Image (cartoon, grey):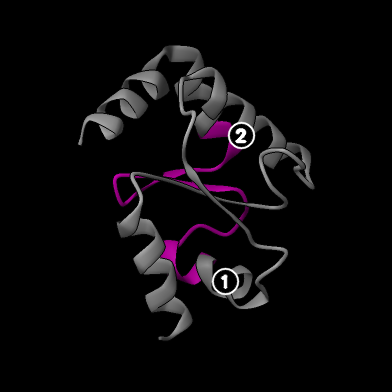
Amino acid sequence: MSVMERIQSEVEGHPIVLFMKGTPQFPMCGFSSRTAQALKAAGASDYRSINVLEDPEVRANLPRFSNWPTFPQLFINGELIGGCDITLELYESGELARMIAESQKA
């Protein structure tokens, strides 16, 4: 399976996927940390996180897959939501909690 197929499989196989530096418990950058905190605060208790620092192939190819240059990258229901700034804006508006609730019903 190519790295692009692996990324596609992760994004399609889980309702919420966060590609980040580190893990939600031990984030390795501030942007990843804030994104994971926003997800938790918005009610995402169980989601797939992928540490791009442990998989250089994914780290190198995810920006090409998503057409988004930076990390973290949040996908909900197979759709790229964005990075830290967009996730925080969605959290502050209440939209992130709605998106998470809908993804968990699906």
Q: How many numbered circles does the render carry?
A: 2
Front residue of 59 and 1: 1
* Label annotation for residue 95: none
The picture places residue 15, in percent across and down from the top left corner, at 33, 44
Residue numbers of the magenta segment: 63-86
In the rendered structure, the answer to whether residue 27 lies left or right of residue 64 reads: right
Residue hosting label 1: 58
- Secondary structure, mark 2, is helix
Relative height, residue 91 to residue 82 (above, below)? above
Residue type indicated by callout 2: Ala
Q: Is residue 20 magenta?
A: no
**Residue in the image at 72% along x and 38% along y:** 25
Q: What number is the disc on residue 36?
A: 2
Label 2 to label 1: alpha-carbon separation: 19 Å
Quarter of the image for residue 11 reads bottom left
Q: Amino acid at mark 1?
A: Val
Q: Secondary structure at mark 1?
A: helix
Q: Residue 1: percent from the left, percent from the top?
A: 40, 86
Q: Position of residue 71 (x, y in %)?
A: 62, 52
Q: Residue at x 60, y 78 (%)?
A: 57
User: Which residue is most to the front?
Assistant: 46
Location of residue 106 by image quarter: top left
**Is residue 81 covered in magenta?**
yes
At x 47%, y 35%, the residue is: 46
